[in-house]
Image (cartoon, helix red, strand yellow):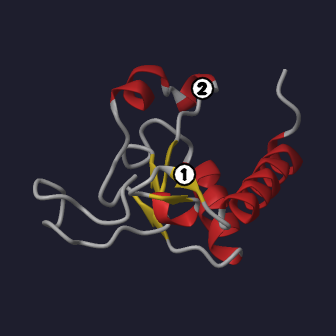
């Protein structure tokens, strides 16, 4: 996601975005415990993390998320300022550290929920 909201963005033009925005449609598309694990893991790494603010999850998570049947769908918006120059669209020095942190997040999910089938 863009670092700041545009003219029609939630909160108005120029509103700074968090590092990560997790969208689970208020617990409808993903078990809140899974959302909390992702939130807490990222926050422990020093990131500013919001849940369902300003994005709750798009049609994709709404269509496929069904926690009651074991299908958890969590939208993860990542602020572009963490890994790229928004003007040139080129990665910057933050790309590699973000990549490492995302792998740490994947490891935490595997540790908690096991390897995918």
Q: CA distance from mark 2 to mark 1?
A: 34 Å
Q: Residues within 10 Å of mark 2 (few under 14, many from 20)?
A: some
Q: Is residue 60 above or below residue 29?
A: above
- Residue at image mark 1: 90
Q: Residue at x 44, y 44 (%)?
A: 24
- Residue at image mark 2: 71
Residue 55 left/right relative to 109: left
Percent of width and height locating residue 91: 60, 54
> Which numbered disc flags the more N-terminal residue, 2 or 1?
2
- Quadrant of the frame with the C terminus: top right
Quick check: marks 2 and 1 in contact, CB under 8 Å? Answer: no
Q: Closer to us: mark 2 or mark 1?
A: 1
- Residue 39's tag is none
Q: Is residue 79 visible?
A: no
Q: Is residue 11 above or below residue 46?
A: above
Q: Residue at x 52, y 41 (%)?
A: 74
State the SS at label 2: loop
Q: Residue at x 53, y 58 (%)?
A: 84
- Comparing 74 with 70, the one in front is 74
Q: Is residue 10 visible?
A: yes
Percent of width and height locating residue 42: 65, 66
Residue 73 left/right relative to 7: right
State the SS at label 1: strand
């Amino acid at each position: 996601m863009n670092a700041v909201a545009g003219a029609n963005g939630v909160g108005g033009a120029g509103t700074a975005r968090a590092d990560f925005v997790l969208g689970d449609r208020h617990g409808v598309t993903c078990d809140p415990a899974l959302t909390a694990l992702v939130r807490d893991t990222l926050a422990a790494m020093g990131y500013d993390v919001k849940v369902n603010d300003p994005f709750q999850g798009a049609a994709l998570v709404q269509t496929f998320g069904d926690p009651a049947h074991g299908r958890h769908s969590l939208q993860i918006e990542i602020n572009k300022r963490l890994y790229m120059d928004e003007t040139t669209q080129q990665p910057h020095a933050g790309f590699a550290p973000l990549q490492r942190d995302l792998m740490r997040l994947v490891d935490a999910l595997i540790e908690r929920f096991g390897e995918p089938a």
